[in-house]
Image (cartoon, rainbow, N blue to C red):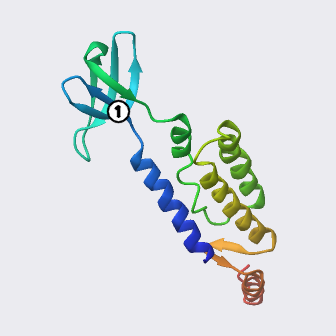
Amino acid sequence: MSHKSLSHIIIAFIFLINNLSADSIKLKNGTVLEGKIVEETTDSITIEYKVTKSINDIKTVKRSDVLEIQKEPEDEKAFKKLNGILPTDDLLSAKDYDEIINGPLTEFLNAFPASKLKGKVQEVVDELKKEKALIESGSVKLNGNWISPEAVSYTHLRAHETGRN
């Protein structure tokens, strides 16, 4: 499998997870509200939910009207925050990769060692380590494509020869 297609699979999985997870409140009258619980008190629960694809609403319901509450697991909430790490930006340095790997990804792995999402996060870490190795070998990522060290040297040499350095 190519480097680029693995990145696309990981990105697709992250988007899939983001669209599947939500808090859910089932009311005694049968109504189900799916969204994000934004506030809870001893008497009520406030949830932000989608009325349509593009319209959100906030509703507060009395706890006495609630039959069941299902909350999105904390690891899934944390996983959503990792969205956007892949594909990486162009022209990142090895230090940039270290900051990404040792920042939010390692924090997730340490905070949720038993998470069912741990393997997916580890796949992202492994992908970033591969990209970091490419950077350390002299490759450059430009416009989403990897340029080999030889091509980088040739381009730099040609620019120098023509006075465009």
**Quadrant the N terminus occupies:** bottom right
Task: Give, as a three-letter code, the residue at label 1.
Answer: Ser
Q: Position of residue 151 (x, y in %)?
A: 72, 85
Provide the secondary structure element on which disc 1 rests.
Answer: strand
Q: Position of residue 45 (x, y in %)?
A: 34, 19
**Quadrant the C terminus occupies:** bottom right
Please tell me how crowded label 1 is: few (under 14), some (14-19), or many (20+) other residues with Cα within 10 Å: some
Instruction: Say if residue 92 shows up in the picture.
Output: no
In the rendered image, which quarter is residue 40 located in?
top left
Q: Nearer the viewer, residue 24 or 41?
A: 24
When the figure is inspected, residue 29 is found, relative to residue 145, above or below; the finding is: above
Instruction: Say if residue 44 shows up in the picture.
Output: yes
Residue in the picture at 26% in, 33% down = 32
Q: Residue furthest top?
A: 42
Q: Nearer the viewer, residue 116 or 9?
A: 116
Counting labels gives 1
Residue in the picture at 63% in, 74% down = 3
Residue in the picture at 20% in, 29% down = 30
When the figure is inspected, residue 58 is found, relative to residue 158, above or below; the finding is: above
Which residue matches tag 1?
Answer: 24
Q: Position of residue 106 (x, y in %)?
A: 71, 45
In the rendered image, which quarter is residue 115 located in?
top right
When the figure is inspected, residue 89 is found, relative to residue 59, above or below; the finding is: below
Q: Position of residue 58 (x, y in %)?
A: 28, 28
Residue in the picture at 64% in, 39% down = 112
Q: Residue furthest left?
A: 29
Q: Is residue 144 left or right of residue 64?
A: right
